[in-house]
Amino acid sequence: MHDLHFKDHLTEQRLFHNRMLVALVGVAMLLGVLVARLYNLQVVNYDDYRTQSDENRIQVRPVAPTRGLIYDRNGALLADNRPSYTLAIVHERVRNMDATLELLGQLVRLEDSDVQKFRKRLQRRRPFEPIPLRFRLSEDEIARISVNEFRLPGVSVEAELVRYYPLTDLFAHSVGYVGRISERDLAQFSEEDVRRYSGTQSIGKVGLERSYEDLLLGEVGYENVETNARGRVLRVLERHDPRPGAELTLHLDARLQKVATEALGDNRGAVVAIDVNTGGVLAFVSKPSFDPNLFVTGISFNDYRALSDSLDVPLFNRALQGQYPPGSTLKPMMGLGGLADGVITAETTIKDPGFYRLPNDTRRYRDWKRWGHGDKVDLIQALTESCDVYFYDMAHKWNIDRMHDIANRFGLGAKTGIDLPVERPGLFPSRAWKRGARGLPWFPGDSLNAVLGQGFVLATPLQLAVMTATMANRGTHYKPQVVMAVDGVEQPPEILHHVEARPEHWKLVFEGMESVVNSIHGTGKKAGAGLDFRVAGKSGTAQVVGIAQGERYDSEALKERHRDHALFVAFAPVDDPQIAVAVLVENGEGGGAVAAPVARELFFDWMSRPMENTVRAAEADDEGVSRG
């Protein structure tokens, strides 16, 4: 017989209630944890988590300022800003950078150098900053990226303004160019620089772009933008506009610059023209030149190699950094100094047999004219025919330190202070210089070399133009300036020195320089050919390689790059000087034959605009500017 089991409803009910109680307690505990967590998120740490959320959704982005424009004196645009489209990546939005770069390489052309530079930029980026990968995208490339946008989180096409030089190589050595901010630039940045350049990829590298960088850059702005999960900008929440850079108006004249460039032809050399009444630089040419647009977004390896390996060295600024023996172009200045110091007078004459000997010295210091210039050579003839013996004799009677002083007052032997970077100082020697630099005393023969602009003497074409302008305005040595106005505010001329000499001394030297151009025996006749105004000038020839005593200069026996340099300095018109010019033609040999015609082209062009130039000179007078 089986046992009978009866159902105990009371026990089951008690068990159910206990289980229910445990379940309710568990649920309550879980709800408590949830409420506590919710309280922690929404109350205790509300500000912190809201900030983190906003950082994922709202980004602060710098807004680059528009770089200041650069104009010539007549309003021609020399440095512009043009829109360009850049492929950029926000690192924080990309899951797999290598895969993203591989995909982008299938859509647009990517050079190995582009990727290498991009990876370097990643190392110095700010959080959520778009890092440029490729510049100057084409419309077709932009379209391909847009179609594949869903496959490219963190990738964007950024519109920006980049520098553009519409006259290409015409002002490369004066206006200069901007380039991408390099590791070297960053290493020199202060915290303030880092802030100012946020959002900006470029910095002035050479020329005015570098020396006026602080003014041209402007002040950075910023904007708060809302982004989606892929980093795409949805809307701008707040914006503080940047302040654009200052606009520069230059003394440089684009038309005159082109005339000078074309007049040099295929020759290597430099031309500098200066406003006699202000020191403003009207033309500044170094040839050969280059296209500065190549550097703006990063020059390619092949392009840079072609420029840097060229024998003609187009990247070298001959007008500012080329230091050449000035040769006979110094003779007018030396003649004036000799008159002022009483070493010579208007009546002083010498006999020139074609050479000069110092007392008790057998060495012959040759004149360029082997048979000499006659028995009674005075200063006018010495300048007209470039008689070396006359100046040898004057130098022997003169003190080298006085020669050094007069040269310094005319702007030789030291930097001119022009508002362009990396100027070189040239050299005009003194006793102290030779003792310190060479450890030797000064010898009489050194003075004979110095008076002819040879030996230790070196000058830049810019310095020769300053010297000539100082001569033209009878002794007022202005600091040369390229920039005429900043945001429309005129930059006043600055006087550095004043050369004291008697009026009759100036008149005598001017007469000699005018005879150089207008006399049948003058060495610079081609500078005034066909002009209806008078020009005063002086030719010069500078040796590149030495010639042994007793030997003759043989052009045919020398390599082209070993031939003499040709120089010419001049101002016009003589009765009311307005423009001074210095011309250097590397290995051109004859200053009067090769360099003088270049100066003539500048004079002809400039003086064909008398109304414009007369007005500017009158304005300078009204402002109380000394005209010497």
Image: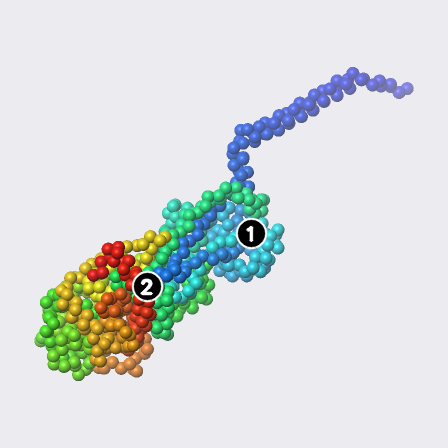
Residue 585 x/y as whole percent: 31, 73
**Is there any visible trace of residue 478 in the rendered image?**
yes
Residue contact between numbered discs 1 and 2, judged by CB atoms under 8 Å = no
Query: Residue at horizontal 21%, vertical 73%?
Result: 514
Q: How many labels were placed on the picture? A: 2
Instruction: Please give left or right for residue 320 compared with residue 436 in the image.
Output: right
Label 1 or label 2, whichever comes before in sequence order: 1
SS type, badge 1: strand
What amino acid is labelled 2 in the image?
Glu
Q: Nearer the viewer, residue 263 or 606?
A: 606
Q: Which residue is tagged 1?
A: 155
In this image, 57 relative to 126: left or right?
right
Q: Would you name the residue on which mark 2 appears? A: 612
Q: Is residue 439 left or right of residue 55?
A: left
The amino acid at mark 1 is: Val
Seen from the viewer's position, the closer of residues 313 and 611 is 611
The residue located at (25%, 72%) in the rendering is 535
The answer to whether 32 is drawn above or below residue 107 in the figure is above
Q: Quadrant of the N terminus?
A: top right
Q: Secondary structure at mark 2?
A: helix
